[in-house]
């Protein structure tokens, strides 16, 4: 039977995933600032309080460390928390619980305990909120053993990956670019739909250049690819979807076909996630490359507010196209 | 006196197998546990001198009355969170001394298969949610355990241990506030040993006492003589009863003193020698021993017999630990993910 598809926004897709998982498993609960009465600042948790009650949809004081710690402790006694940070930037206050506790408790106890926690947060710039509400800090979390990191780029991936993240027995950072929240896309109907962690998706087939892009930049890469196609340049776009664990095989296969690679990520350039992707692909594909790898990242500055300044430092489809032309010319 | 003892409870405190707290059996058990903590840690000092301890251990010697008195109020379904100075809580909760010592030595048969060491001894099956290497790190975790237990429909009380140094961490404030607004079943037990490494309590902590901070969070606070095991039990038992009745958390400040340095790794000591000696005169074990003899709860012979049993048990634990193999190198890559 062909699955029925429904046009769904990214926010609604996340909301459906939460509802379906909370109906399926009474140990799943949601905790965070403003997640209950108003359904979250970005409406991802809308309607949950009404359906599941205050014991499973918990509005908190502004206490990020205690929110994260509450997740860690509840997971130790068998619950499955989904924690919302209002902005990823605020997670800095909760880092002890994530880095020193959630990521390490299984290892430090020799495998005695598990930490089935999802840490959700909107990430990234683009709506003029300035340097403390715009960061893409995914590289920090990818660096730490014991964590998984997910960054969906479409409504379907948002729903399918969130369901898998909630069912996973490890701590998962689930990073949602806020510019994607209002975007619509086809999502398979039915509760059985999910997307496994650790599997990349080839979003566009091509033969000339591989572009590996994450989160919001996947859409930019696809636009750049469509524009370059007019000039006869055929781009393959790969979305890792799960930044950790990374589906290396899918990317290697692509680069061995195209022999050229551009890596795109909304994090800062220096020591960013793009740098890790380049290191991995260099190790795996060095002798298959016909040109040096290029990366397209956010410039190494705190995010400014003025639209002209913001545009100057954020990744754009023009930047991606320029990088693609550069690796072809090399 | 022991109000909670007389309430209907789903099970009795685990350590005293149903015996009332003022029974001879219970009191001898407390004496035995305090002596076990002391003897276990004196062996750590020996093993460290012999170069057998990889890393460090933070000794609880001098503070035994707190762990034993507090854990005596725990029921089977209750949980505890501990600290970097956690051996006392683990022993008072009934963890196996052999597996504990094997963990301190980083061996395969340790509670954490040699991956955690002294600072991460955990036994989920006993509700011991773990020692913790981050000062104040376990306090929010205790709030989560209470939330999780409530979600699972369990009437568990969470006993959250931390030092006075942790009271100046933001996590203390966030966690106590959250526990209070949700009326969670928690007992916050501050072990005030007066020194945070080199930093004296009075110079680092605003306000008269830790217990005094309780009113800011709308919960009862009480300062307790941490070297009086029965006083600790009475206060913790009362707070636990309140918690399990849905009346919310309490903050108890148990004042005591660590006899040894901050850790076996730390060489610096800036505490006045006179102060250390004065506190040794207030030893909770000697004091309880005298109390038991004075009230004729025990004879010197009975206590001597307990001392011998403790020494034998700890010796066995050391032998077990020394005989436990080093973990295989390939195990370093295991247990990162579930």
Image: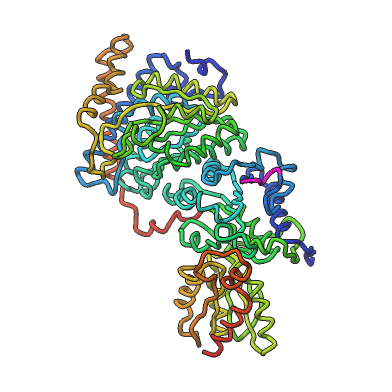
**Above or below, comparing residue A32 to residue B157 in the picture:** below
Q: Who is closer to the viewer here, A228 or B320?
A: A228
Percent across and percent down for residue B265 are: 26, 45
Total label count? 0
Quadrant holding the N terminus of chain A: bottom right
**Above or below, comparing residue A18 to residue A59 in the picture:** below
- Left or right: where B225 falls relative to A154: left
Name the image colouring.
Answer: rainbow
The residue under the point 31% across, 9% down is B296
Is residue A98 visible in the rendered image? The answer is yes
- Left or right: where B223 falls relative to A155: left
Question: In the picture, residue B94 is in which quadrant?
Answer: top left
Percent across and percent down for residue B162 are: 41, 35
The part of the chain drawn in magenta is: A33-37
Is residue B77 visible in the rendered image? The answer is no
Percent across and percent down for residue B2 are: 48, 15
The secondary structure that most of the magenta stretch takes on is loop
Residue A188 among magenta residues: no
Q: Who is closer to the viewer here, B178 or B89?
A: B178
- Left or right: where A165 falls relative to B208: right
**Above or below, comparing residue A297 to residue A13 in the picture:** below
Question: In the picture, residue A134 is in which quadrant?
Answer: bottom right
Percent across and percent down for residue B229 are: 37, 21
């Amino acid at each position: 039977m062909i699955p029925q598809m429904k046009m769904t926004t990214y926010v609604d897709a996340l909301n459906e995933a939460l509802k379906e998982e909370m109906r399926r498993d009474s140990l799943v609960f949601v905790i965070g600032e403003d997640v209950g009465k108003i359904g979250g600042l970005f409406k991802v948790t809308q309607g949950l309080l009404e359906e599941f009650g205050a014991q499973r949809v918990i509005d908190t004081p502004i206490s990020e460390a205690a929110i994260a710690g509450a997740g860690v402790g509840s997971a130790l006694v068998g619950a499955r928390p989904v924690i919302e940070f209002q902005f990823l930037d605020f997670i800095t206050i909760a880092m002890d619980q994530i880095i020193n506790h959630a990521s390490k408790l299984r290892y430090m106890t020799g495998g005695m305990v598990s930490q089935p926690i999802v840490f959700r947060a909107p990430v990234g710039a683009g709506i003029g909120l300035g340097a403390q509400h715009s960061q893409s800090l995914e590289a920090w979390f990818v660096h730490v053993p014991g964590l998984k990191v997910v960054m969906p780029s479409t409504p379907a991936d948002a729903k399918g990956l969130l369901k898998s993240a909630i069912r996973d027995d490890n701590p998962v950072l689930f990073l949602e670019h806020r510019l994607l929240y209002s975007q619509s896309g086809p999502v398979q109907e039915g509760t059985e739909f999910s997307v496994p962690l650790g599997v990349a998706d080839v979003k566009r087939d091509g033969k000339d250049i591989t572009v590996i892009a994450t989160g919001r930049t996947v859409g930019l890469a696809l636009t750049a690819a469509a524009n370059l196609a007019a000039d006869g340049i055929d781009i393959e776009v790969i979305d890792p979807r799960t930044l950790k664990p990374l589906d290396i095989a899918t990317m290697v296969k692509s680069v061995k076909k195209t022999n050229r690679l551009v890596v795109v990520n909304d994090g800062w350039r220096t020591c960013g996630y793009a740098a890790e992707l380049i290191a991995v692909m260099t190790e795996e594909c060095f002798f298959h490359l016909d040109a040096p790898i290029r990366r397209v990242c956010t410039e190494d500055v705190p995010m400014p507010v003025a639209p002209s300044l913001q545009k100057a430092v954020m990744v754009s489809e023009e930047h991606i196209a320029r990088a693609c032309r550069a690796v072809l010319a090399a | 006196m022991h109000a909670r003892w007389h309430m209907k409870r789903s099970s009795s405190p685990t350590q005293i197998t149903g015996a009332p707290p003022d029974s001879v059996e219970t009191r001898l058990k407390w004496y035995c546990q305090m002596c076990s903590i002391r003897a276990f840690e004196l062996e750590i000092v020996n093993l460290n001198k012999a170069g057998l301890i990889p890393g460090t251990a933070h000794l609880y010697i001098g503070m035994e009355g707190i762990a034993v008195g507090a854990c005596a109020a725990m029921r089977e379904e209750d949980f505890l969170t501990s600290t970097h100075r956690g051996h006392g809580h683990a022993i008072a909760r009934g963890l196996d001394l052999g597996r504990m010592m094997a963990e301190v030595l980083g061996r395969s048969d340790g509670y954490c298969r040699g991956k955690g060491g002294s600072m991460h001894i955990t036994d989920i099956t006993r509700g011991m949610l773990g020692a913790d290497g981050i000062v104040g790190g376990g306090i929010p975790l205790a709030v989560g355990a209470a939330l999780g237990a409530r979600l699972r429909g369990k009437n568990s009380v969470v006993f959250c241990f931390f030092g006075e140094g942790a009271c100046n961490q933001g996590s203390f404030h966030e966690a106590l506030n959250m526990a209070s607004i949700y009326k969670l079943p928690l007992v916050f037990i501050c072990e005030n040993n007066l020194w945070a490494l080199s930093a004296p309590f009075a110079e680092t902590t605003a306000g008269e006492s830790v217990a005094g901070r309780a009113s800011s969070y709308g919960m009862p606070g009480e300062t307790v003589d941490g070297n009086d095991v029965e006083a600790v039990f009475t206060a913790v038992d009362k707070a636990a009863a309140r918690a399990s009745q849905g009346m919310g958390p309490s903050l108890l400040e148990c004042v005591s003193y660590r006899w040894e340095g901050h850790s076996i790794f730390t060489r610096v000591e800036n505490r006045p020698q006179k102060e250390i000696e004065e506190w040794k005169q207030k030893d909770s074990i000697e004091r309880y021993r005298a109390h038991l003899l004075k009230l004729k709860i025990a004879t010197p012979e009975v206590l001597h017999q307990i001392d011998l049993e403790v020494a034998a048990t700890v010796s066995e634990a050391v032998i077990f630990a020394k005989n436990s193999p080093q973990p295989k190198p390939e195990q370093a890559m295991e247990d990162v993910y579930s």
